[in-house]
Image: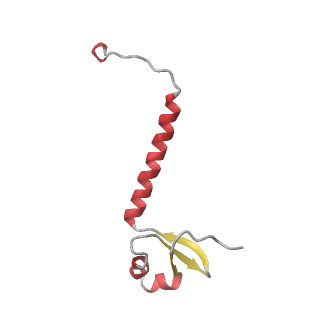
Amino acid sequence: MTNQIYSEVTASISELKKNPMAAVDSGEGFPIVVLNRNKPAFYCVPAEIYEAMLDRLDDQEMVAIVKERLVEPSIRVDLNEL
């Protein structure tokens, strides 16, 4: 069975242990895949990319909530009456 790799840059566990920051820097700001016995073990994602991914996930969740609520009946409210 072959594993798909979703990164252009790879590093071995040994390389990561030897010099973690050099391994991360080899991705030049993009995620790297860390291989264990030539199989992807995990992805190392720079903090900026990880934060952007979380922001996009939050946005997608908000879009799903908005779409759910679009079918709910609306109620007119006058702010002066509150």
- Residue 78 lies, in percent from the top left, at 33, 15
4 w.r.t. 63: above or below: below
Residue 77 versus residue 23 in the image, above or below: above
Tell me where residue 51 appears, x and y as whole percent.
Answer: 39, 58
Q: In the rendered view of the protein, which quadrant contains the C terminus?
A: top left
Q: Residue furthest left?
A: 80
Q: Which residue lies furthest to the top in this view?
A: 81
Q: Position of residue 8 (x, y in %)?
A: 51, 74
Q: Is residue 63 above or below residue 56?
A: above
**Number of numbered discs visible in the structure rendering:** 0
* Residue at 27% in and 15% down: 80
Residue drawn at (65%, 72%) of the image: 3
In the rendered view, how is the structure colored?
Answer: secondary structure
Displayed quadrant of residue 18: bottom left
**Residue 46 in the image, given as x and y percentages of width and height:** 40, 68
Judged from this view, the residue extending furthest toward the right is 1
In the image, what residue occupies the spot 48% across and 85% down?
A: 15
User: Which residue shows up at 51% across the image and 85% down it?
Assistant: 14
Q: In which quarter of the image is the N terminus?
A: bottom right
